[in-house]
Image (tube, rainbow, N blue to C red):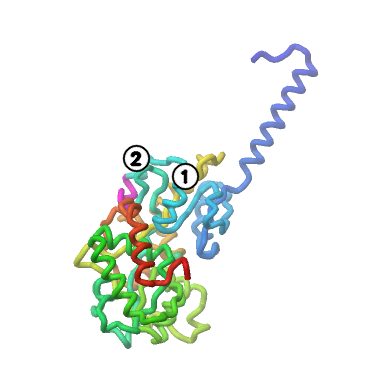
Amino acid sequence: MSFPRVPWLRAGLVMAGAWMASLANAADKEPLTVNWYHSAPFLQPVIDEFTKQSGIAVKVTDSYDKFDTDVILVSDYKSLTEAKKLNSFERIRSPDLDAIVPARWRDRDGGWYGVMLRARAVVYNKALVKPGEIKSYRDLADPKWKGKIALRSAANVYNRSLLASMIVHDGYASAAAWAKAVRDNAGERPEYSGDTGNIWRVAKGEFALAFVNTYYICYEMAKGREKTNGLKLADNLGVAWLDQDRAGQHVNVTGVGVRAGTTRKDDAMKLVRFLLSQKGQALLSQNVFKYPVRSDVPPSPLLQSFGNFRADDLNLNDLELHYDEADGIYRAIGWKSWEE
Ligand SMILES: [Fe+2]
């Protein structure tokens, strides 16, 4: 385009251009958004380091299941699959990220990458269970635990993913028999609780054991709940890593992706890459108490104090076809679910 010869028109065009550029700059200064769901202050130190390194301001929101932020963090493979079905993710597959995150912990279509591992392990009361007494999820089916297992509702996505993984490993019949036996052990009308509630019920000795995502232990410590409850969790709770002589400890992921249609794709990818960098992984482990997906970053000292484990090598993408079966099993055996 050539500039007009009329001076005032030329000046006007220059001014209009400057105005449009300033609008674009203002838009650039809007913070990048990312969602978080387990208390934003835990994620904030990780985000602060990203902002320090990149100069990109970030706002953390708690819009957990709306998938409306530029960078989408979602926990559990099942929830990631729901977000993917809503076409929430830009395709972000890239060879360097593929080299960092093993195929079993990332979307096979390149929509998201696992960024942290969540281990669903057994916590037990040290006075009621001996170390080594629980070695496998299968041990929970033993009738000797009748009335001693604190359960969480089967409507919970973590339990649905757990049973789906058992179906993949052991087949439908074996997984169904396991679920029925564990449900029977909880008695006729069990009182269900969330992972946090079950951690305290076990720590207080009301139950011998529960299976929970272990980061909830750390959240309770960090929130000062030991003081409120007058009880030290580490003194009372043991963590049993499961299936170490079988497929490995059941794990799930928190995945990260970029929202389809965001105008901030480049900045969003910078945050994704930071979260998957060695620095980002170490900070996540220290601050949100989950396990790095990178094999070259050790878990934080607090996580290591619970002992180390070998994670299940199951490809999480294989779970997708088994949720209906898992849900059907839970309904059939009366492990509290959606209808109740
Ligand atoms: Fe959680």
Between 218 and 322, the residue placed more toward the observer is: 322
* In the depicted structure, whether residue 192 falls above or below residue 55: below
The yes-or-no answer for disc 2 within 8 Å of ligand 1 is no
Residue nearer the viewer, 202 or 175: 175
* Prevailing secondary structure class for the magenta stretch in the rendered image: helix
Residue 101 belongs to magenta span: yes
- Residue 250 placed where, x, y %? 31, 64
Residue 79 in picture, x, y percent from top left: 44, 55
In the rendered image, the residue lying farthest to the left is 245
Q: Position of residue 229 (x, y in %)?
A: 50, 84
- Tell me how far mark 1 sits from mark 2, CA to CA: 18 Å
Amino acid type, label 1: Phe
Q: Residue at label 1?
A: 89
| First-in-chain label (1 vs 2) | 1
> Is residue 245 part of the magenta span, yes or no?
no
Residue 270 in sight from this viewpoint? no
Residue 119 visible from this viewpoint? yes
User: Which residue occupies the foreground of this view, 177 or 113?
Assistant: 177
Residue span colored magenta:
99-104
Would you say 291 lies left or right of 241 here? right
Q: Is residue 278 left or right of residue 133?
A: right
Q: Residue at x 72, y 32 (%)?
A: 19
- From the viewer's perspective, is residue 96 above or below residue 192? above
When the figure is inspected, residue 254 is found, relative to residue 226, above or below; the finding is above
Residue where numbered disc 2 is placed: 95
